[in-house]
Amino acid sequence: MHFYTKLILVPACSALLVINLAGCGGKKKSKNPVAPVSEEAAAKDSGFSTWSNNAEVRAAIEAQDYATAKSLAASRISESPTDARAHYLMGQALLGDKKYAQARKSFETAVELSPEDRNYSRSLNECLAKMIDVALEKDMASEAIELGKKLLQEGYQTQETEARLAKAYNITATRLADSENFAEAEAMLREAVNLLPDQPETRVKLARLLMQNDRLMESERILRALTETNPDFAPGMAAYAALLHRMGEVRKAGEMVNTALKLDPENNEMIALKASFARDLPASATPGSTASTTSIETIQTRLRTLERTGNLSEQKKLLENLVALYPSETISLLRLSMVCEKLGMIDDAHKYAEKYLSSEPDSLPGRLQLARCLYQLGDHTRAMNLIQEIEPDYPDKLEIMA
């Protein structure tokens, strides 16, 4: 009997034990050492892989193995197109390989993907600066200007960028002026002056262009302001001296050249100007005297320039020198009388008109000029008598009425 009881109980207990063990297993699982890694662990592994790949690219760039660097970066980009770092490293590899246009695109992509990373934007600006230098070397000044404007907006190395930009503007303006497209050349230089107020070379370029087109007063305003703000800028002083020389202010021009030569003794333009000034000075002239030229043709050329600019005071000085140096040029007395009249110096105008008529008594313009002076001095009767005498023979009746 006991034998059969044991025979029944043993299997039953075994079954019960299996059930209990199964229940315990449902409440608590043991840790499986070969189970799949968690998402966090997978991310860490992926990050390590990315860092490792980037390190390989950087090592290739440092070794100047740009082909390998580009290949590794391209592989990384194909795996993860939104990896800003990979695009940045591709840009670095292309930059080292002097593929500037392609490098620019890679840097721009990196900046777009990660705009907060200043390393990416700084490298983009470095690339644009390289592209400006290449554009200038290839005489592609218009492209250099557009790139320079971008860098200026970014505030990247302002002083160096402005110098590059000024060079590009000057090249473009010179090309336009050489093709006689003066209006566009002037517009280009005025844009440059407004954009680059601290670049004196551009203002000198504009002043010389205006001088070339006989707009001397505009040129004088620019150069006067420039020499006041940049007194040690020798090219500005040289340009101003050349302008003053052309306007007949030889003494002032000579003083400015002497000052400029102290700043830049090897400046060829100023050395040539000084030599020309020496030729223009008459033998009796002293350093403190009003300078003139011994060549009557040169004086006449300067007088025409001064007449165009309306510089009456300098016309008077030059005509006084002309009268003193060339007494036989009596027409200069009449011109001097007219200039004095315009300056309101009626007594002097009358004196020179009388002196002119003493050698040219039948000159109709001379007698009309004397009549004008007499009228303004209050001698109306004598003035009207002179006008009545010359009116029948005077070719321009409107001039008499004026």
Image (tube, rainbow, N blue to C red):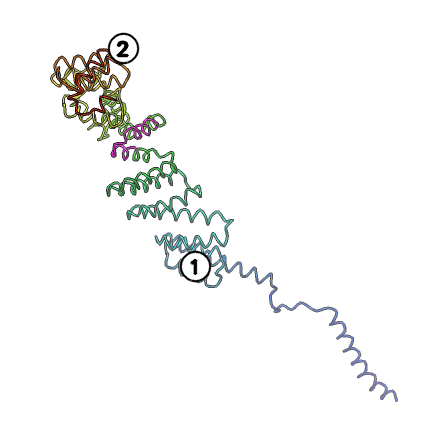
Q: Quadrant of the C terminus?
A: top left
**Kind of element beneath mark 2:** loop
Q: Residue at x 70, y 69 (%)?
A: 29
In the rendered structure, the answer to whether residue 230 lies left or right of residue 278 reads right
Q: Neighbour class for label 2 at 10 Å: few (<14), some, many (≥20)? A: few
**In the rendered view, does 136 fall on the left or right side of 93?**
left
In the displayed structure, 382 sits above or below 280; it is above
Q: Residue at x 22, y 13 (%)?
A: 383
Outermost residue, right side: 1
- Which residue lies under the disc numbered 2? 378
Specify the quadrant that holds the N terminus. Answer: bottom right
Query: Residue 199 location in percent, x, y?
Result: 35, 35
Labels 2 and 1: the sequence-earlier one = 1
Q: Is residue 44 visible?
A: yes
Q: Which residues are magenta?
A: 207-225
Name the residue tied to disc 1.
73
Do residues under tags 2 and 1 come within 8 Å of each other at their CB atoms? no
Rendering coords of residue 228 (x, y %): 35, 25
Pick the residue in front: 323 or 255: 323
